[in-house]
Amino acid sequence: MTSNGLVRLCHLYPDHLNIYADRGNIAVFQRRLEWRGLAMEVVEVGPGDAIPPHCNLYYLGGGQDRDQELVAADLAGKARPLRDAAAGGAVVLGVCGGYQLLGHGYTGAGGRRMPGIGLLDLETTAGEPRLIGDVVLDVTLEGWTGTVVGYENHAGRTHLGAGCTPLGHVRRGWGNNGADGGEGAVVGRTVGTYLHGPLLPKNPRLADILLGWALDHAGLPPVLAPLDDSLEQDAHTVAITRTGRKR
Ligand code: GLN
């Protein structure tokens, strides 16, 4: 619980899971809070470090299979405090490789299965070809309906169980597995997605939903004053237009 306008973010494995400008997502969280007179403290956690108590948001970025292999066992050892944090209402965001490790496990291209932390009811297995390209999703989240744009590049095919729902439905792109039209996964305040590039600069509404949850967890009013997002919206629109031209 914080009372001084401070949101605490735990950045898990910043030296390993950072393949697609993941720090850009954290910069968006920080700036969107600062523009509202709030602040974010970032705690970086690597292999062997304990999960800090009292964080409001936990972030796991993307990585190549070999990077995921370097952290998967360590992350599995942190499953309990992370699951407790999520059960207590903290936000968890996993992108691509981090998303896969929020599930039950990921069998990489080399055939070895890495354990996940089971926060999301899903399983991932690498396949061919890699699923690459621009993505546009139709999303309904926290009473908001709109589009989320991004880029995907993954070998993993992710299949969701009954315990979570897709973040969105693919209008353009491959999504979780290229077959069922779903992309990402949500349960409670845990969100996973294959979209990176990074995810949040072009999707300010999604950033604010996650920040609202984090503020609520911090014991702060979860109301965020509107910002001038015209630049972000232009980038969002360009992403949709560009994708429309390609396919
Ligand atoms: N290594 C994983 C895969 O290829 C995740 C890739 C990523 O994080 N971009 O599916």
Image (spheres, rainbow, N blue to C red):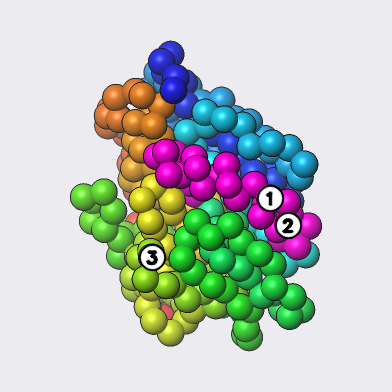
Ligand 1 near label 2 (Cβ, under 8 Å)?
A: no
Helix, strand or loop: magenta stretch: helix
**Three-letter amino acid code at the position of disc 1:** Gly
Residue carrying label 3: 163
On screen, residue 220 above or below 173: above
Residue carrying label 1: 77
Asked whether the residues under the numbered discs 1 and 2 touch, taking CB atoms below 8 Å apart as contact, a structural biologist would say: yes
**Three-letter amino acid code at the position of disc 2:** Ala
**What is the CA distance from the residue labelled 3 to the residue labelled 1?**
22 Å
Q: Earlier in the sequence, mark 2 or mark 3?
A: 2
Camera sees residue 28: no
Asked whether the residues under the numbered discs 3 and 1 touch, taking CB atoms below 8 Å apart as contact, a structural biologist would say: no
Residue drawn 44% across the image and 23% down it: 1
Q: Nearer the viewer, residue 42 or 77?
A: 77
Q: Secondary structure at mark 3?
A: loop
- Residue 41 sits inside the magenta stretch: no
Q: Quadrant of the C terminus?
A: bottom left
**Three-letter amino acid code at the position of disc 3:** Gly
x, y (%) of residue 156? 59, 75
Residue 43 falls in which quadrant of the image?
top right
Badge 1: residue crowd in 10 Å (few <14, some 14–19, many ≥20): some
Residue carrying label 2: 73
- Indicate left or right for 57 with 126 as reference: left
First to last magenta residue range: 68-93
On screen, residue 33 above or below 141: above
